[in-house]
Amino acid sequence: MARVYMDYAATTPVREEVLEAMLPIYRETFGNPSSIYSYGREAKRVLEEAREKTAKLIHAKPEEIFFTGSGTEADNWAIKGIASAWKGKGNHIITTTIEHHAVLHTCEYLEKNGFEVTYLPVGQDGIIDLEDLKRAIKDTTILVSIMHANNEIGSIEPIKEAAEIAKEKGILFHTDAVQTVGKIKVDVEESGVDLLSFSAHKIYGPKGVGALYIKQGTVIDNLLHGGAQERKRRPSTENVAGIAGFGKACELLETEWETEGKRLLSLRDKMIEGIEKSVPDVVLNGSREQRLPHNINFSFSSCEGEALLLLLDLYGICASAGSACNSASKSPSHVLLATGANIETAHGSLRFTLGRNTTKEEIDRLLSVLPEIVKKLRGTAPFYKN
């Protein structure tokens, strides 16, 4: 029985074209790009070509792209780097209650070191109220960090409008766009953001490579200290093969994301409609309209998310109970709790995320087994009534 993968928000398979772009680097262009002899110059050329491709996907300038080891590192650098560089002006940061833990835990760390953080609430749809942002701004506010779209429930935040509010007050704006780059339109010039984090392994590139967009002229301190790599901003010998793969993934998506987004949107809506018709007592989590084209997140009354996952796995279907980065935790999703869901509802949630290999037949297969799985689990639930 062929397996069905529906957890593309956790990670994506490396595309064959990406792998082909990486292999020659491992085999031939293995030099250190900081070296001045031929092997180093060849590696440097690969690095800069990838930087151009990566920048083009988000409409940035190549010199505004700095490669990191992950999206998490990019988030940490954006927040800690601005906090350090601007602490003379103020110590207040604004973020939201539904951010990825790479942002939330960084903010919690800063709170222990003299900074004040305001966590904006979200509505039942997982979207912030811009009036809350306006009210939260203080004279000491130096940074607003709001994710472009949520990794669990897929709700898309009003980033452009939020960045405009921050800009009017002279405040820097960062967005975690790990879940949106390559999925929907991401244009740093149009959105007006100052910093943007993204990652290769969410767009069919290799793991262990990310990037931080830093708008030209933005004053930010380094997160790491060491050599002069990445124009003295991010020391460490660059992962040239991984970055080449990142660049190739960006190059492919630059021409594909819009068409693929429409295809996934059709599959997503088919799946949402199918689940709501075939399974009683379910709740779609997140916004129905302002939602990523590949994200489906449901709560199933009187079911444990982990039990659902295990039974689906027996049928060869792979999904998620929430963020992959928090899958080992027994705690309910902080995102769902922030939207007003109770603990039982949060524990009974499943996230399905689709990708370029997802087919209509796979959706049909999921819809053919899910109702019986839910019925079986509810049959053992003492308080469930059909």
Image (tube, rainbow, N blue to C red):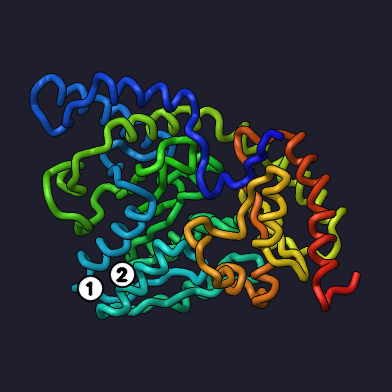
Q: Is residue 177 left or right of residue 88?
A: right
The three-letter amino acid code for the residue at tag 1 is Lys
| Image marks 1 and 2: residues in contact by CB distance under 8 Å | yes
Q: Upstream in the sequence, badge 1 or badge 2? A: 1
In the rendered image, is residue 140 in sight? no
Question: Can you say whether 238 is above or below 178 in the image?
Answer: above
Q: Give coordinates of residue 147: x percent, y percent.
A: 47, 59
Q: Nearer the viewer, residue 379 or 277?
A: 379
Q: Residue furthest left?
A: 36
Q: Is residue 282 left or right of residue 351?
A: right
Between the residue at mark 1 and the residue at mark 2, the CA separation in whole angstroms equals 7 Å
In the rendered image, is residue 285 in sight? yes
Q: What residue is disc 1 on?
A: 89
Q: Secondary structure at mark 1?
A: loop
Q: Is residue 254 left or right of residue 221?
A: right
Q: What residue is disc 2 on?
A: 142
> What residue appears at the point 15 percent right and 46 percent down from the top-left corner?
232
Q: Give coordinates of residue 323: x percent, y percent.
A: 53, 58
Q: Nearer the viewer, residue 308 or 229?
A: 308
Q: Secondary structure at mark 2?
A: strand
